[in-house]
Image (spheres, helix red, strand yellow):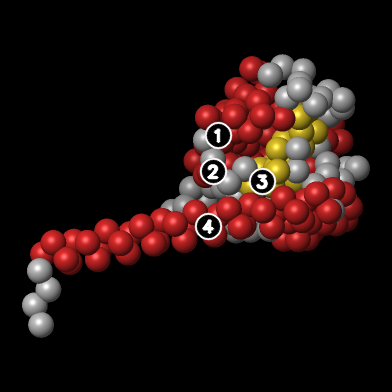
Amino acid sequence: MKVSKPLLAGIVVGLIVVFVVGANWYRGREAAVAESTATGNSALLERPYSPSLGPAGAPVTIVEFFDPECEACRAMYPIVKQVMSEFDGRVRLVIRYMPLHQNSEYAATLLEASRVQNKYWEFLEVVMFRQPEWASHSAPRPELLLTYAPLVSLDAEQLRVAMTDPQIRSRIQQDQSDGVTLGANRTPTFFINGKPLMQLGYAQLRAAVQAELP
């Protein structure tokens, strides 16, 4: 039986509508589940050891489950900085690790080790800026990470020693465990005052922060 072109077009449009509605329903349900989990387990969002930037009493806390080797994390990095600058003093950022790439746990370990010399945020800036160099898909060179230490006045030898601390690995594993429980199965995953950010981008992050401000 031949199907007329108008009827075929109608069927296609109908299938597209069903797909879009279904996808939106799934994303909405996913967001609701993630928010419910975060609300019921607020301790999973932030641990006492978690690196944070911004006032402790800020009305908005952004928690980012982060992979230093993730290109999307690098793309969002300046966006997070911009939003924090726009809402200066009213937003706090908390970093959690979710290393999903080959060399990301090594990079996270170095970042944690840099805290011993109080250079975490400075080193993070370099690691993100130089990511295309050390984390190239075709020819990754993680050994370059240690060579960046002098760029932010880090002592490379002290950094090498500090990264052997077993507590660092324990922290990264705890972050991964918390992230899995919270549904942070991709990076970056953001929670704004415990509410998951379902779409990445400047406008979406800014709107989510704005919505939480008194």
Residue 116 in percent (x, y) is at: 86, 36
Whether the residues at callouts 1 and 2 have beta carbons within 8 Å, the answer is yes
Q: Secondary structure at mark 1?
A: helix
Q: For the residue carrying disc 4, how many other residues have a C-alpha within 10 Å: few (<14), some (14-19), or many (20+)?
A: few
Question: In which quadrant will I find the N terminus?
Answer: bottom left
Q: Is 51 situated left or right of 30 in this image? A: right
Name the residue tied to disc 4. 25
Q: What number is the disc on residue 204?
A: 1
Q: Is 54 situated left or right of 85 in this image? A: right
Name the residue tied to disc 2. 199
Question: Amino acid type of disc 4?
Answer: Trp
Pick the residue in front: 146 or 105: 105
Q: Secondary structure at mark 2?
A: loop
Mark 3 / mark 1, whichever is N-terminal: 3
Pick the residue in front: 158 or 203: 203
Residue at the spot 18% in from the left edge and 61% down from the top edge: 9
Q: For the residue carrying disc 3, how many other residues have a C-alpha within 10 Å: few (<14), some (14-19), or many (20+)?
A: many
Residue at the spot 83% in from the left edge and 29% down from the top edge: 118
Residue 154 in percent (x, y) is at: 76, 30
Gap in angstroms between the C-alphas marked 1 and 2: 6 Å
Whether the residues at callouts 4 and 3 have beta carbons within 8 Å, the answer is no
Name the residue tied to disc 3. 196
Residue at the spot 10% in from the left edge and 69% down from the top edge: 4
Question: Amino acid type of disc 2?
Answer: Gln
